[in-house]
Image (cartoon, rainbow, N blue to C red):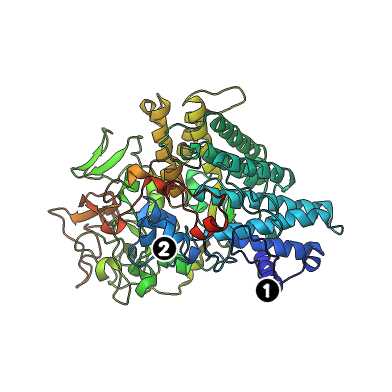
């Protein structure tokens, strides 16, 4: 993509801005304003450094955390087998104040690598906001730019300033306004705003961005924010500001359950405005929810395609080699053929996430200490994965499931090249499908993530071209999320079924559109009788639809339910899978016992994922222990900043 190449050139030419302290009142180094703000190309090149501030959470070593899926592990989505050797061990230990002063993912304020996506997210926000403020100050004064060129730069700067401020405050809470360049004679000892006051600055920036940004960029500029990006962020930010956690002030943390009434009505209005804009422009830009038939291509798509239809705001990584993130995050040794730590599955889903995928008839399902439970009269506990929400088979590889092919090792049987997730007792190849070259093969919960994999990426040998068959971007906001935001805000503002004047869809109707387009039934009527009952189904729907999209960690904090989730000494659960009595493993050739599930025919083996030949028992994953106290709802401000700026108020409990 030409835009990314140009960013790299301009960083080399201009250097990068120092951002050791959050106000950074020192003059920028490595360039002069006369050079940068001389013409459109140099000004845009300077601004385009800001794209490195985006949290590319699916990239290898994002936030300097190799081979991990950081926020999925901080939340209850899943666990990393290397939890004892990564930043996640320290983060889930809860001692964030000490970590804030160190170079550590997510909570660290140290500005090493601030101009790369390997840097800590908080200093990257400050760095990017400063770039935006300089563009907003200088570009309107440039006399050799057309009005369209000014609008392009200024519109993007408003958007990015709002986005980065949102990224900051959803972690640390309300903060002083960072809406101007700070000079050496400015008073930096400013008081913090509340979250609601800070959010008002974001809304104001999005209103300006909506006026100036284009509907769409030319293909070579794909990845820049558009009007739909700004509409979507305005909706998302307002829903956060209305949420229970954000009702708290600066000095205490009370447990709220309800939303701010006025702000949640605004959140519903802004989500409606975004969806109306998308509908009005559907014939031209087609940023609608993707159907059941094309659902997988939300998350990966042909290498020649820039972006999926649903993506409204995302990190454009078209053409990137996905071998490292695919094999390091999602695949085990017998899928990838890679040895050591890069051939180790670094993330496996929590059983509580698996439970959230309802039956096809809309009933909840749960694996308990006493076995599988569901109120669905059609549910068969002997085949617990049959007739479930179709998204389960899009997102998760189940024990015994066949997915893709690998290099032939087992003769010429019809399915000899099939990869089966052999995480049942006795089916563990190389320590549950790892190897002995410095890696670990333990698939701790016995499930793997399928969402970002495609069958030809399962090759069984390193460097195979199958890793390049598709591409994907880290999606930051997509169309379906806006529908979910709308459903949540409407329910909290008006209840499950009410549609005030000017609103086309009730909360229930909006949520059902999300479900029905993937072949899942509408929410059952008994769950829509009260706001509180339907709230649970909305939150369940978000957990399912947005699984592993860097949303769950922020959701459980803004809803103030993380304390409850992590009150279990072992909040991450897995399964112990055994072959049922009377079933014998399939043995295609000698010495291959355990690599294939039971079955006398190919069809029987490929249906093993439904559970007919297995029993499942709940297990505790000791590597998934979390320490989460009330104070952990907000990240701490590091001590150095508190010492330099006494007017700052530290977050409660820190």
Residue annotated with mark 1: 12
Q: Is residue 41 above or below residue 196?
A: below
Crowd class of label 1 (few under 14; some 14 to 19; many from 20; radius 10 Å): few
Comparing 562 with 233, the one in front is: 562
Comparing 86 with 339, the one in front is: 86
Crowd class of label 2 (few under 14; some 14 to 19; many from 20; radius 10 Å): many
Q: Is residue 645 left or right of residue 497?
A: right
Judging from the image, what secondary structure is the residue with disc 1 in?
A: helix
For the N terminus, which image quadrant? bottom right
Question: Which of pointers 2 and 1 lies earlier in the amino acid sequence?
Answer: 1
Do we see residue 25 in this rendering?
A: yes
State the residue at coordinates (35%, 34%).
361
Q: Which mark is residue 264?
A: none
Say if mark 2 contacts mark 1, CB within 8 Å.
no
Residue 353 at what x, y percent from top left?
35, 47
Q: Is residue 337 left or right of residue 260?
A: left
- Of all residues, the one furthest to the bottom in this rendering is 437
Comparing 101 with 160, the one in front is: 101
Which quadrant would residue 144 be assigned to in this image? bottom right
Which of label 2 and label 1 is nearer to you?
1
Residue 310 at what x, y percent from top left?
56, 47
Do we see residue 218 in this rendering?
A: no
Residue annotated with mark 2: 68
Judging from the image, what secondary structure is the residue with disc 2 in?
A: loop
State the residue at coordinates (37%, 61%).
90
Residue 614 at what x, y percent from top left?
21, 52
Could you tell me how many numbered marks the image carries?
A: 2
Q: Is residue 624 above or below residue 565?
A: below
State the residue at coordinates (54%, 53%).
475
Which quadrant would residue 539 be assigned to in this image? top left
């Amino acid at each position: 993509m030409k835009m990314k190449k140009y960013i790299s050139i301009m960083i080399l030419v201009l250097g990068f801005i120092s951002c050791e302290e959050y106000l950074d009142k020192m003059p920028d180094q490595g360039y002069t304003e006369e050079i940068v703000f001389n013409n459109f190309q140099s000004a845009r090149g300077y601004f385009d450094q800001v794209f490195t501030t985006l949290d590319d959470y699916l990239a290898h070593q994002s936030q300097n955390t190799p081979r991990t899926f950081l926020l999925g592990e901080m939340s209850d989505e899943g666990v990393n087998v290397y939890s004892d050797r990564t930043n996640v061990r320290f983060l889930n230990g809860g001692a964030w104040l000490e970590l804030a002063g160190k170079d550590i993912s997510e909570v660290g304020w140290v500005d090493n690598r601030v101009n790369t996506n390997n840097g800590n997210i908080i200093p990257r926000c400050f760095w990017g906001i400063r770039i935006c403020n300089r563009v907003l100050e200088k570009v309107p004064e440039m006399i050799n730019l057309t009005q369209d060129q000014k609008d392009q730069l200024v519109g993007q700067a408003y958007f990015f300033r709002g986005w980065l401020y949102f990224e900051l405050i959803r972690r640390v809470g309300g903060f002083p306004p960072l809406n101007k360049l700070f000079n050496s004679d400015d008073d930096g000892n400013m008081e913090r705003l509340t979250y609601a006051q800070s959010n008002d600055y974001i809304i104001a920036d999005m209103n300006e961005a909506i006026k100036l940004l284009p509907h769409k960029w030319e293909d070579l500029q794909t990845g820049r924010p558009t009007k739909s990006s700004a509409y979507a962020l305005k909706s998302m930010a307002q829903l956060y500001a209305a949420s229970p956690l954000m009702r708290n002030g600066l000095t205490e943390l009370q447990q709220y359950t309800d939303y701010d009434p006025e702000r949640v009505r605004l959140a519903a209005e802004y989500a409606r405005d975004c969806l109306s804009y998308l509908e009005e422009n559907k014939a031209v830009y087609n940023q609608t929810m993707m159907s059941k038939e094309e659902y997988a291509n939300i998350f990966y798509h042909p290498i020649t395609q820039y972006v999926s239809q649903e993506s409204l705001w995302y990190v454009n990584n078209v053409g990137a080699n996905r071998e490292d993130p695919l094999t390091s995050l999602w695949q085990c040794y017998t899928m990838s053929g890679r040895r050591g730590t890069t051939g180790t599955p670094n993330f496996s889903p929590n059983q509580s996430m698996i439970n959230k995928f309802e039956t096809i008839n809309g009933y909840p399902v749960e694996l308990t200490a006493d076995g599988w439970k569901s109120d669905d009269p059609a549910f068969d506990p002997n085949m617990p994965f049959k007739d479930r929400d179709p998204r389960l088979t899009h997102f998760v590889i189940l024990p015994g499931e066949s997915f893709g092919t690998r290099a032939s090792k087992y003769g010429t049987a019809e399915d000899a090249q099939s990869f089966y997730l052999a995480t049942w007792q006795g089916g563990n190849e190389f320590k549950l499908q790892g190897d002995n070259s410095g890696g670990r093969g333990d698939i701790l919960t016995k499930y793997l993530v399928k969402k970002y994999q495609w069958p030809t990426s399962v090759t069984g040998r390193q460097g195979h071209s199958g890793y390049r068959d598709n591409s994907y971007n880290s999606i930051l906001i997509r169309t379906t999320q806006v529908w979910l935001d709308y459903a949540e805000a409407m329910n909290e503002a008006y209840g499950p079924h009410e549609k005030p004047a000017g609103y086309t869809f009730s909360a229930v109707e909006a949520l059902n559109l999300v479900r029905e387009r993937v072949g899942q039934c509408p929410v059952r009527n008994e769950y829509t009788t009260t706001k509180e009952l339907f709230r649970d189904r909305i939150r369940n729907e978000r957990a399912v639809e947005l699984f592993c999209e860097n949303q769950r960690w922020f959701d459980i904090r803004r809803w103030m339910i993380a304390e409850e989730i992590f009150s279990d000494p072992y909040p991450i659960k897995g399964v112990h899978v055994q072959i049922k009595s009377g079933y014998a493993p399939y043995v295609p050739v000698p010495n291959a016992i355990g690599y294939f599930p039971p079955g006398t025919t190919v069809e029987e083996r490929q249906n093993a994922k439904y559970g007919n030949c297995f029993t499942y028992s709940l297990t505790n994953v000791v590597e998934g222990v979390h320490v989460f106290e009330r104070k952990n709802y907000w990240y701490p401000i590091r001590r150095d900043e508190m010492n330099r700026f006494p007017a700052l108020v530290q977050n409660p409990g820190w």
